[in-house]
Image (spheres, rainbow, N blue to C red):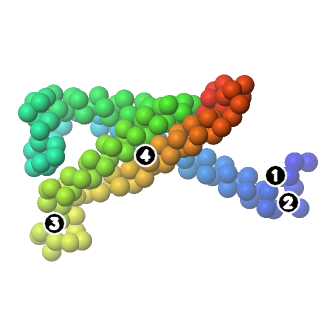
Amino acid sequence: MSSTNNPNFPETCSVSRSQRLLALARQIAVLGVVMPMLMIGLLKFTSIEVQALKPLISQTPWLSWLYAVFGVAGTSYVLGVVEILAAVLVLASRWSTKAAIAGGGLCALTFATTLSIMLAVPIWEVASGGFPWLNRAGSFLIKDLALLGVSLMVLAEGLLRRQRRARLPASNRATVSSTGH
């Protein structure tokens, strides 16, 4: 009888369940980053999204230069490519250390940038009395705080795997790399 099914070992049973719950939570969290990045990245190629980005980018001094370099539509397309690439890399992060580092880093940079927009555009609903009531822009941007956290988790996991791999003898590195641990 395995210890996970043995009532005489409740700690082992709860640890096993906790580990499974943690693995499930990680998968859901990663999917929670991948899906918005992929779907919003695809939207960046539509005229509706190109127009929706205008006030956010043009009113943010540290982003407005993008329009001078890429144009209004081109900026949206570049952002779309970055978001789709980041989504694919985060999706592959379970199997690839390099994908975890690149995808987690790209997503973290993306979400830190979008959160920084909150410093440049009005985010409080004046009609409701201002703070703490968010307007549409604030409601759209605030979710990126959680997505930033998950992105940093993916990045940190990739960096930890790379550190562990570097400490292993060369003969064990291929096994670690292929299992993603």
Residue contact between numbered discs 1 and 2, judged by CB atoms under 8 Å:
yes
Residue contact between numbered discs 1 and 3, judged by CB atoms under 8 Å:
no
Residue at the spot of label 4? 151
Residue at the spot of label 1? 4
Mark 1–mark 2 Cα distance, whole angstroms, equals 7 Å
Viewer-proximal residue among 169 and 151: 169
Residue 6 lies left or right of residue 44; in this view the side is right
Residue 66 visible in this rendered orientation of the protein = yes
Mark 1–mark 3 Cα distance, whole angstroms, equals 52 Å
Residue at the spot of label 2? 9
Identify the disc placed on residue 125. Answer: 3
Q: Residue 120 location, x and y as percent?
A: 15, 56
Q: N-terminal of the two: label 4 or label 3? A: 3
Q: Amino acid at mark 2?
A: Phe
Between circles 4 and 2, the one closer to the viewer is 4
Residue 17 lies left or right of residue 145; in this view the side is right
Identify the residue shown where x is 20% and y is 52%.
117
Mark 4–mark 3 Cα distance, whole angstroms, equals 29 Å
